[in-house]
Amino acid sequence: MTTKSAVAAARATVYGYPRQGRRRELKKAVEGYWKGRVTADALRAAAAELRRTHWRQLAEAGIHEVPTGDFSYYDHVLDTTVMVGAIPARHRAAVATDALDGYFAMARGTQDVAPLEMTKWFDTNYHYLVPELGPDTVFTADSTKQVAELAEALALGLTARPVLVGPVTYLLLAKPAPGVPADFDPLTLLDRLLPVYAEVLADLRAAGAEWVQLDEPALVQDRTPAELNAAERAYRDLGALTNRPKLLVASYFDRLGAALPVLAKAPVDGLALDFTEAAAANLDDLAAVGGLPGKRLVAGVVNGRNIWVNDLEKSLSTLGTLLGLADRVDVSASCSLLHVPLDAAAERDIEPQILRWLAFAQQKTAEAVTLARGLARGTDTIAAELAANRADLASRTASPITHDPAVRARAAAVTEADTRRSQPYGERAAAQRAHLGLPLLPTTTIGSFPQTDELRAARADLRAGRIDTAGYEERIRAEIQAVISFQEKAGLDVLVHGEPERNDMVQYFAEQLTGYLATQHGWVQSYGTRYVRPPILAGDISRPSPMTVRWTAYARSLTGRPVKGMLTGPVTMLAWSFVRDDQPLGDTARQVALALRDEVNDLEAAGTSVIQVDEPALRETLPLRAADRPAYLAWATEAFRLTTGGVRPDTQIHTHMCYAEFGDIVRAIDDLDADVISLEAARSHMQVARELAAHGYPREAGPGVYDIHSPRVPSAQEAAALLRRGLEAIPAERLWVNPDCGLKTRDWPETRASLESLVAAARTVRAELSAS
């Protein structure tokens, strides 16, 4: 039984909510604005309606205090940059002319101005826009967005809590602006930034905010004493303000560790902590510091990052332990629900019993409400929910979907020899050069070409029965012909088939492997208006039949140049799926690797001499704590080598990574033993090339010279300048020329022009090298 104080205290809340809407209304409105089909007023009206709908959903579900300010047209870190006035100099004119267009210029760039760098939000597949700061940065408060959205929620009669990126995390995520020395530490700007936060907090209090949430997820990473001192100073100063709302400091994704006593002692009014499996140590650490007497604790016991139903009894046990450690305990998901789809009930093609294993944002909200009611009023009041939850958990455990003895036996039989190529890299490289006959600075692309409206329409027509399979495949063949023809005319050296048949680089493979479930409406924001439907990895994995051989072979029949076979690697297949939580990730990775190994071997047997196995998520999935990284990197690199280890020496294995901080994993990149790696580098000005050189990376590499996440077309001169910078770090005989990433999201006109610039740049620099 719970105490009377718990009865009065326990309420349900969430840190944030999906932004896109049930039918991705936000994506359609924003992209319509970019194309001139939607006015600014119409875009703002659509956004306001989405916010109202989401808040009402939360309130009607029983959420006591709805979050505001977490909504964004593009990215919440970019919103914070606007809030604190840290607009880069190159974007100030655009922002001054039109705030909305200037905002999107920072996010996407224009033909004349490059965008902000983009990278992954901690260990998720969400991308944020990196703040650019320097010693001359002047911060100015602009609380317009935060105050307006709070006012909207209050006008609906709701209790609302504005959510802001905290000042310490904001500075720790920032980088030196272009032209600023690389050793500049943005955290030195903290004392300059805190008065701006104070002003925003005062504005929110005046607008009616009782509580404000300050997100500090950067504090769950390993932090130096100086960084912890900065956190102590930040919340000492903000807590001492007299004209402020109550402050709730939130962390998530891992345990707080050394930062927990710092925040527990700070003069703030509450902490929000992650108590899921990844951060279970927070419970012991909180008890060790004596709890939070006199303060509010928001307990994140519902996993906000995965889609499996919560073990309600286990969560109630955790909550019961926490009751004695804080003045008030509220119940929440472990992080913003931005990272999961909106509503599992919308899925019509998943078997009903399996559907009961799944919890998307709306179901997680209901779980938090149920747990709060059980904590406050006693478990008898939720007896029916607990019984149903036990049945759902037991059903999943006993399901034959989750266990395939043949798959498990094959995985158990893997040996060290299976994870190694038959010859060392130096011997392989000589064999590959002789076999492929490529020029100096070979040009290629990463894999995908524009997914046109016609291609999407063809897939929709096939699903709706308006065309048959033969008609659909004829359209795919025509697109492959066009892509191959363009690449030959443009002068690219290693071609791709363009992936017109693929809906998504993970989903396409998941739909052909056993053990995966696909959703119809499970959209999750990756960046800006890019939404993906992560498949659900529910059981043991195998490959019933070849997945890519047919279309790759068709493309090869159209040209005499090498055509890359294109696969998604095992770590990325896990990272961009919702993974099973009932066995170690390394075990699942080995199963996926064996399925992909079969595909690699079949591609080679069909005559494919260049095979790319993409691993853009290798860095993304890196644990946030250094102590946890060696074990992860051991199974992650082994899984890649298991995928690729069975090919001949003269078969060239490529891999690709993008939009992450690669310096932390250069040694692991080496351990993959790929022959060629292509990496995002355009926005970061070839930083990764320098990191590879500093490590002594011995293989071939293609740091990107074309930023595909911007609509701007680079000139040949610009691409050549980046290429020359790459040559400062990587010798010409090991340097490739390619875009940052796949071209799926780009239009054909800019793709043609950009790749023509890329090829022209390669030819120019080749000529310079031959003349020198």
Image (spheres, rainbow, N blue to C red):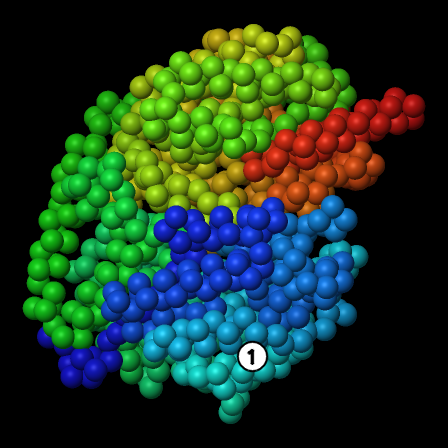
Residue where numbered disc 1 is placed? 200
Considering only vertical position in the picture, is 359 above or below 692? below
Q: In which quadrant is the C terminus drawn?
A: top right
Q: Position of residue 710 (x, y in %)?
A: 65, 44
Disc count in the image? 1
Q: What type is the residue that disc 1 sits on? A: Val
Q: Position of residue 457 (x, y in %)?
A: 46, 30
Considering only vertical position in the picture, is 306 above or below 644? below
Residue that appears at 21% across and 43% down: 355
Furthest-bottom residue in this view = 242
Q: In which quadrant is the N terminus drawn?
A: bottom left
Residue that appears at 23% across and 51% down: 309
Q: Is residue 335 left or right of residue 668?
A: left
Q: Position of residue 396 (x, y in %)?
A: 18, 42
Does residue 111 show up? Answer: yes
Q: Is residue 81 left or right of residue 454?
A: right
Residue that appears at 62% across and 43% down: 709
Disc 1 crowd rating (10 Å Cα; few below 14, some 14-19, many 20+) is many
